[in-house]
Amino acid sequence: MTGLTTQVVPLELGEHSYDITVAYGLKERLAVFLEPWNQGQQWVVLTQQAIYDLYAPIIDSLKDAGFTISPIIVPGDESAKNIRFAEDVWSQMVELGCDRSSILLAMGGGVVGDLGGFVAATYMRGIPFIQLPTTLLAMVDSAIGGKTAVNLPAGKNLVGVIYQPKAVLVDPSFLATLPKRNVISSLAEAVKYGFIRDSKIYDNFVTRFDDLVGMQDQDLLADIIAKSCAIKAQIVSNDQFEGGERKLLNFGHTIGHAFETIQEYGGLYHGEAVLYGMKCASHISFKKGLLNDAEYDSAMSVLNQFELPELGKVSPERVLEIVSHDKKNINGTLSFILVDGIGNGVISTSVTPEDIVESLAVVQ
């Protein structure tokens, strides 16, 4: 491990701007990073039981530093992104005496971050929140940009709001406790940035895949995290409310979300579903002439390196039904993300149901 430093990535959104701070060992100095926001108010740490069991001393250290802070525990899986759990968290916050000055600290993966942001955005019409992601997927993607949501039976993330955190604090040392499956799932969002914006990130997955999955090179990991954060920050700064460029971040997500919905959020991890979705999107890109033979073969080779659970047979009709409810489907026209060469994501409105059905062959 050499040359590890604190990297600060600004996300410029006018009065809603904030910094994404990437630093090994940040969690041991968390009180220092949070001190600017501590005015003696009630804080809440929204987390899951497994994270709390591992990192309760972090919360204790904040208490020792003078923070008035209490944990609220929710399930760690996708089932927590439900209005029922949001209501339960709101009720517990009332019992704790939280008011509009209170701050919610979302400590966990994407589920905790999404639910925490949604709760913060709606409790007393909005209280501040800070993201402390503990998974790689959250560090490079879901904790950044202000998307908050809960799910409905009809689809993923259908109820939510864009609500920016006050800060995103990233400590890659959290990842040391992640099982390999979580690492593989989380790397999906990092390789996505390579597909849509930065071919150098993509090249790291070609040449150093084992180092990334094994997380043996901390310099490499910190660099991938910081580069991914910078790409998302730049895209979100240009398009906070997903009117155009921000849609590029959905590469692999349209069909991937359909796979998650079909499995009722209980089979595939989010990143695993996105990896399957990226295979489908790459196939469609190839069929539309946006990827040449060599690029397509390389893309599928990279994506096939990831160990994924069996998807099983999926009904094309069900996939199309779910895609028809996708948030990117406006007035019957779907904005589908393809790649026009590696490192260049594009928004297409010409992807047909037939294209989607044909693409399912590469994951069945």
Image (cartoon, rainbow, N blue to C red):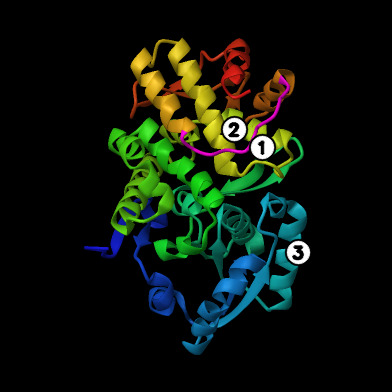
Dot in front, 3 or 2? 2
The answer to whether mark 3 and mark 2 are in CB contact below 8 A is no
126, above or below 27, in the image: above
Kindly report which numbered mark, 1 or 3, lies closer to the viewer in this rendering: 1
Looking at marks 1 and 3 on the same chain, the residue that comes earlier in the sequence is marked by 3
Classify residue 117 as left or right of residue 245: right
Quadrant of the rendered structure where residue 201 is?
top left
Q: Amino acid at mark 1?
A: Glu
Circle 3 sits on which residue?
88
Residue at (37% x, 71% y) in the render = 25
Q: Residues within 10 Å of mark 1 (few under 14, many from 20)?
A: many
User: Does any portion of residue 102 appear in the rendered image?
Assistant: no
Q: Which mark is residue 260?
A: 1
Q: Position of residue 267 (x, y in %)?
A: 69, 42
| Part of the protein shown in magenta | 305-315
Image quarter (top left, top right, bottom left or bottom right) of the N terminus: bottom left
Disc 2 target residue: 256
Q: Residues within 10 Å of mark 3 (few under 14, many from 20)?
A: few
Residue 207 vertical position relative to residue 110 in the rendered view, above or below:
above
Q: Given contact means CB atoms under 8 Å apart, are the residues at marks 2 and 1 in contact?
A: yes
Relative vertical location of residue 103 with respect to residue 323 in this rendering, above or below? below
